[in-house]
Image (cartoon, helix red, strand yellow):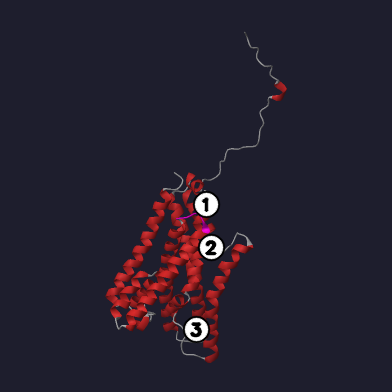
Amino acid sequence: MTTEPMPTDRASTQIHNIGYRHYDGPRLGRAYARRSLFSQSLRGAYGLGRSAKSKVLPMLLFVVMCVPALIMVAVAVATKAKDLPLDYTRYAIVLQAVIALYVASQAPQAVSRDLRFKSVPLYFSRPIERGDYVAAKFAAMTSALFILTAAPLIVLYVGALLAKLDFAEQTKGFAQGLVSVALLSLLLAGIGLVISAVTPRRGFGIAAVIAVLTISFGAVSTVQAIADAQDNGGAVSWLGLFSPITLIDGVQTAFLGATSAFPGAHGPSSGQGVIYLLVVLGLIAGSYGLLMRRYRKVGL
């Protein structure tokens, strides 16, 4: 039995030109992609380029961070005070709850959505690599936190100069405050991103970051208060190693001339401060390393 071929309708067989063209323009490469990812992530940390609802919380927290500084400046100018009510290095420690809430809300936004919607492999297809992705996200989160914590210090500094306070003293305090919040931004950005990268669920990431930052600070502060009540100042100093906020407090007490917020003002000595600084740097480097390991497993 033979099968005759089906007749071909030549009029219905066509090749359509759908307009694809070869790209002959410049290849911007990894550096441009890395900068674009950094810029997009930094803007996203303040809701820029996103819906109006996404802007509310980060902008509100930014205002909450700056309002106390404005009030202090107004009081200093009105009363012709000889010094600011709060040291530059103490400002972030006092408002650490606001900073923790910002980290908890924005760190998951930076990485969890990419994991949830499985867009990370698209980033890694080309031209960027995993190291570029991690570096861009880490730098963007650090920069966003630095803006949040440094802006009120700038308000304090400008206000202090307007109040005609001592220029050299205020400049020194302002510089010390900037160093302190830079370390704080690096540390909290790393911790927040590592926790958030564990789960694609943004809600879980928010809850986990809040729990780690607030519970650790509350537990350390409570145990420090008990140790101080028992006249054990040495224990108070060493206990500060177990919370991110108290770690920064210890570093700035030891090296930046800050007044310790530890119970009984039992801040670390210079020798203990070296250990504090090494722990801070180790946590920052460790956070970056953990992020690299996490993203080696994504998209394979």
Q: Is residue 69 above or below residue 27?
A: below
- SS category of the residue bearing label 2: loop
20 vs 300, nearest the viewer: 300
Q: In this view, does 292 lie above or below 77?
A: above
Q: In this view, does 25 lie above or below 290?
A: above
The mark tally for this picture is 3
Q: Which residue is drawn at 40% across and 53% down?
A: 292
The residue singled out by tag 1 in the image is: 116
Decide whether the magenta segment is chiefly helix, strand or loop.
loop
Query: Considering only order in the chain, which callout, 3 or 2, is on the residue closer to the N terminus?
Result: 2
- Residue 138 drawn at (x, y percent): 45, 59
Cα distance in 3D space between marks 1 and 2 = 18 Å
Place residue 186 in its image quadrant.
bottom left
Say whether marks 1 and 3 touch (CB < 8 Å).
Answer: no
Query: What crowding class fits label 2: few (fewer than 14 Cα within 10 Å), some (14-19), or many (20 or more)?
Result: many
Identified by mark 3, the residue type is Ala
Q: Residue at x 36, y 80 (%)?
A: 225
Query: Considering only order in the chain, which callout, 2 or 1, is on the residue closer to the N terminus?
Result: 2
Q: What stretch is highlighted in magenta?
A: 198-202
17 vs 73, nearest the viewer: 73
- Residue 38 drawn at (x, y percent): 50, 57
Query: What crowding class fits label 3: few (fewer than 14 Cα within 10 Å), some (14-19), or many (20 or more)?
Result: many
Query: What crowding class fits label 1: few (fewer than 14 Cα within 10 Å), some (14-19), or many (20 or more)?
Result: few
Identified by mark 2, the residue type is Ala
Identified by mark 1, the residue type is Arg
- Residue 243 drawn at (x, y percent): 38, 70
Nearer to us: label 2 or label 3: 2
The residue singled out by tag 3 in the image is: 160
Would you say 244 lies left or right of 158 here? Answer: left
Name the image quarter holding the C terminus: top left
Q: Is any part of residue 245 visible from this angle? A: no
